[in-house]
Image (cartoon, rainbow, N blue to C red):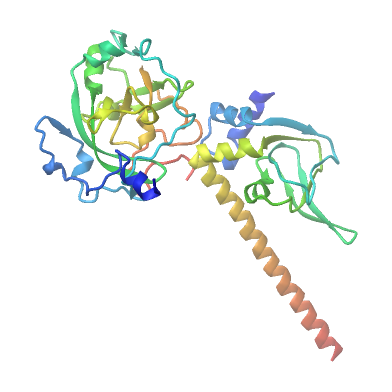
Amino acid sequence: MSFLDSLIKDPKYQTTEPRKPEQVSETDMIISPDTRRENRIPPGQSRTKKWPVLDAHGAPPIDLATWNFEVEGLVDKPLKFSLDEFLQLPTVKVYADFHCVTRWSRLDNVWTGVSTREIAKRASVKPEAKFVLALAYDYGWTTNVPIEYFLKEDSLFGFMHDGAPIPPEHGGPVRLIIPQLYAWKSAKWVKGVRILEHDEAGYWEEGGYHMRGNPWAAGDGERFRWS
Amino acid sequence: MNEQYAELITGFPLFKGFTVNGARRLLDSGEIKEHQVGDVLLKEGDKADFVLLVLSGTLEVFVDREGKHLVLTQAKPGTILGELAVLCGIPRSASVKAKERAAVLEWSDEAFRTLLLRDPSLSQRIFREALRTLVEKERSLIDSIIDAQDEATKSYSTDL
């Protein structure tokens, strides 16, 4: 198979121009507000039609039979779900763009999963909560997110991307999706969240990556804490 | 000891923004080596299969030419040495010895490349620093050439 063939036969390769939010026909779709911007590519980013794979350690082995998801920290009701239980929760669909700190942006993604608001409501997050530390299956990997971004309407724990299960290399079975921040905040292989009052640096943040990571921040976006 | 070095690394300008945990990961991917005064850490012409981060002490970067010992620079804590030869796959372009008792973090070729490949922020910082050093060397070389030409012109004028 030629390189071009393998690209075009890649089911995640986008062969058409991205839809505009008003062209999304599903009425129950949550539209990520950044897709309504006139220019959907943040400063310093370029559009990719592919879906590149980047991570710190590669996909970890995950046994779906023992997979579980926990909510801990500043909550009145700590939660724990098996995969079956998690998939029974009410779902949402989100139309969103996806911006990686390595400067690619993948537009026009449809995520299906459980809204972060649904999880926060079930856990009764305490009022003093200000930050969320997402915990992942890949060898203790974490990332920190301000709770206002975690609770945006378009943030979710996704298990489907464009109508198919999220493949392991892209963070399945369940991946945190925070469309309004750089994609490293969208923790692959998420295994739970810890709700905190104080910010706590995650894996990449411990290496100088931005504590918030807003791609739309003036200049070049909030990529690193050193530039 | 590693904990002290982790704290130390967070204060190096090249690693601005690193937390102690982040610095610990850098330490875990390499090996700390201690050297006495006069120890040679890198030798010009040798195969380049590791990179150094100076943790403590001062190292002297030098070349020996026609019986002359030419000191190119002194490397202080926080400096990375030997990365260009590793990245370019070329022999060491200079030698390095301990001017005083020193500790370095030594990353193997593979460990260093893995660090850079996995962490775009770190690779951007290290390439930026390496290129800045090269540009400074080039400027210094140009200044030396101009000085040498001025000297040559001066002596020619005197001869007249």
Reply above or below: B120 against B153: above
**At 78% across and 51% down in the image, what residue appears?**
B45
Task: Write the residue at 36% across / 11% down.
Answer: A65
Q: Position of residue A215 (x, y in %)?
A: 33, 42
Residue located 84% across and 35% down the image: B36
Numbered circles on residues, count? 0
Image quarter hosting the C terminus of chain B = bottom right
Rendering coords of residue B60 (x, y %):
78, 47
Residue B67 as seen in the image, left or right of residue A34: right
Vertical relation: A48 (above or below) A191: below
Report the residue that reaches farthest toward the front: A1
Snapshot quadrant of residue B49: top right
Image check: A21 left or right of B114? left
Q: Is residue A3 left or right of residue A177?
A: right
Residue A214 screen position, x and y as percent: 34, 39
B108 or A101: nearer the viewer: B108
At x 86%, y 88%, the residue is: B159
The picture places residue A194, in percent across and down from the top left corner, at 37, 17
| Location of the N terminus of chain B (image quadrant) | top right
Residue B22, visible in the rendered structure = yes
Left or right of residue A117: residue A128:
right
Of residue A14 and residue B78, the one placed in the foreground of this image is A14
Front residue of A45/A223: it is A45
